[in-house]
Image: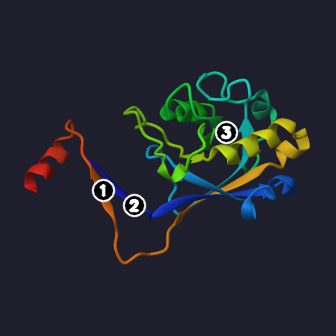
């Protein structure tokens, strides 16, 4: 059984730098939704350097997720965030490839112009072992990041830092709860029988 508390936590992405990129977003913020699998660090932040590999844009190639640049830099206090595009394989595969390569967060660009609040980064049933969070951003925001990344100098790329906060929403009088059941879970079946 899976219990989901709705509208309790939202991922807020802030572009920390460089200023030329930050100014392309309202207040430097990017709207995002987070995956329903992996480890979501509730109440915490991840500050990281963004990486993108145009030769493996969807992140579906297990051996081609990170660029050589990632392996050559000195590891600093910023955690690696890898950006991939939606498509060609499922969300779990993308996030697992990023986790295996040492990424601390998967940032997925939607491949459609749609309201991402209506998109769910779903688990295909194999995401149980993933220990990093994943977030999705809208297509237009993602294209801005890609364009900047592809035209930036090495110095500008090194300055491209994001801050992802998994904040609690404002308290509400009512809490919305969803119960998701699976027929293979004995506890779920017992719970349904007791109701």
Place residue 195 in its image quadrant: bottom left
Horizontal placement of 141 versus 95: left or right?
right
Q: Nearer the viewer, residue 154 or 33?
A: 33
* Distance from the alpha carbon under mark 1 to that under mark 3: 30 Å
Residue on which disc 3 sits: 83
Q: Residue at x 49, y 74 (%)?
A: 170
Place residue 108 in its image quadrant: top right
Horizontal placement of 190 versus 155: left or right?
left
Q: Are marks 3 and 2 in contact (CB under 8 Å)?
A: no
Q: Residue furthest front?
A: 113
Q: Residue at x 74, y 56 (%)?
A: 15
Residue on which disc 1 sits: 178
Looking at the picture, does residue 46 appear above or below residue 173? above
Looking at the picture, does residue 176 appear above or below residue 192? below
**x, y percent for residue 47:** 69, 54
Q: Are marks 2 and 1 in contact (CB under 8 Å)?
A: yes
Local SS, label 2: loop
Q: Residue at x 67, y 39 (%)?
A: 82
Residue on which disc 2 sits: 6
Q: Residue at x 70, y 30 (%)?
A: 66
Local SS, label 3: strand
**x, y percent for residue 27:** 74, 65
Place residue 6 in its image quadrant: bottom left
Give the class, few, some or many, for how many residues have Cα within 10 Å of label 2's Cα (few <14, many ≥20).
few
* Distance from the alpha carbon under mark 3 to that under mark 2: 26 Å
């Amino acid at each position: 059984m899976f219990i989901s508390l709705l509208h309790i936590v939202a991922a807020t992405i802030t572009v920390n730098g460089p200023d030329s990129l930050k100014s392309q977003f309202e207040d430097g913020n990017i709207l995002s939704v987070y995956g329903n699998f992996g480890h979501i660090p509730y109440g915490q932040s991840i500050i990281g350097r963004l990486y993108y590999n145009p030769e493996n844009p969807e992140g579906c190639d297990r051996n081609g997720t990170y660029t050589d640049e990632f392996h050559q830099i000195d590891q600093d206090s910023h955690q690696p965030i890898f950006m991939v595009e939606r498509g060609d394989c499922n969300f779990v595969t993308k996030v697992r490839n990023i986790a295996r390569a040492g990424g601390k967060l998967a940032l997925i660009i939607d491949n459609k112009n749609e309201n991402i609040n209506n998109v769910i980064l779903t688990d295909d049933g194999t995401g149980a072992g993933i220990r990093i969070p994943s977030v999705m951003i809208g297509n237009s925001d993602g294209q801005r990041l890609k364009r900047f990344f592809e035209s930036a100098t090495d110095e500008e790329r090194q300055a491209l830092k994001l801050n992802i906060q998994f904040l609690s929403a404002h308290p509400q009088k009512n809490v919305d709860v969803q119960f998701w059941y699976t027929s293979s879970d004995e506890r779920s079946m017992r719970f349904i029988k007791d109701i």
